[in-house]
Image: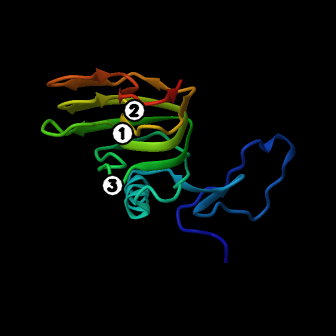
Amino acid sequence: NTMLDECATWARNPSNLTLINSYCTVEYNEDANYFVIDSEEDWNTFCSKVSNAKGTRSVNAVLLADISITEPVGQSNGTPYTGIFDGGGHTLNVNIKKEDKDNAAPFMYATNFTIKNLHVTGSVEGRNEVSGLVGSAAVGNMNTITNCRVSATVTGTNQRTAGFVGRNFNVKT
């Protein structure tokens, strides 16, 4: 049985495709495996995968629905987000309150990343290097942000408050 509970049938370009008794799986496979996110619970699992990877391997993900989150990914310099995150044109509505912490953002620490096709709304609060997308991008790595929009309220109590990247090292936008 290939069907997962609460799993919807879907395809990227279904115009020339007939799907019969076909269901999505936990991973989205294009050129690499992608973890599928379509709920806050999935986001929390994604955060755990990133934490467990400790920045030593990519954790690619694709967002399949607009979701709301309260916890950021890559919550320490030792567990940064690394990989490709494809928002699929969906919205990540954030409510991140880290008033006493630096790098508050949906992606707190990130290195060797591509974030694309994502809209961020909601609010982010922190101390230094606060932003609506990436708190701190690692030194010396090429990181890419493509086709993203931040409409979130971003509040920092000290320095380096920004829309996309709170502390920017070699980020192509």
* C-alpha gap between disc 1 and disc 3: 16 Å
* C-alpha gap between disc 1 and disc 2: 5 Å
Q: Which residue is mark 1?
A: 106
As drawn, is 107 to the left or to the right of 64? left
Label 3: which secondary element: loop
Q: Which residue is mark 3?
A: 78
Type of residue at label 1? Pro
Q: Residues within 10 Å of mark 3 (few under 14, many from 20)?
A: few
Name the residue: 53% across, 24% down: 173
Name the residue: 68% across, 51% down: 10
Q: Position of residue 132 (x, y in %)?
A: 35, 29
**Of the residues tagged 1 and 3, which is closer to the observer?**
3
Is 84 drawn above or below residue 162 in the view shown? below
Name the residue: 73% across, 63% down: 22
Residue contact at pointers 1 and 2, CB within 8 angstroms? yes
Quadrant for residue 69, please give it.
top left
Mark positioned earlier in the residue sequence (1 or 2): 1
Question: How many numbered marks, from 0 up?
Answer: 3
Residue 133, disc: 2
Is 126 drawn above or below residue 54 in the view shown? above
Type of residue at label 3? Gly
Is 166 drawn above or below residue 25 in the view shown? above
Mark positioned earlier in the residue sequence (2 or 3): 3
Q: Name the quadrant of the N terminus.
A: bottom right
Type of residue at label 2? Leu
Label 1: which secondary element: loop
Name the residue: 36% across, 22% down: 163
**Of the residues tagged 2 and 3, which is closer to the observer?**
3
Q: Residues within 10 Å of mark 2 (few under 14, many from 20)?
A: many
As drawn, is 123 to the left or to the right of 158? right
Of 156 and 88, which appears nearest the observer?
A: 156
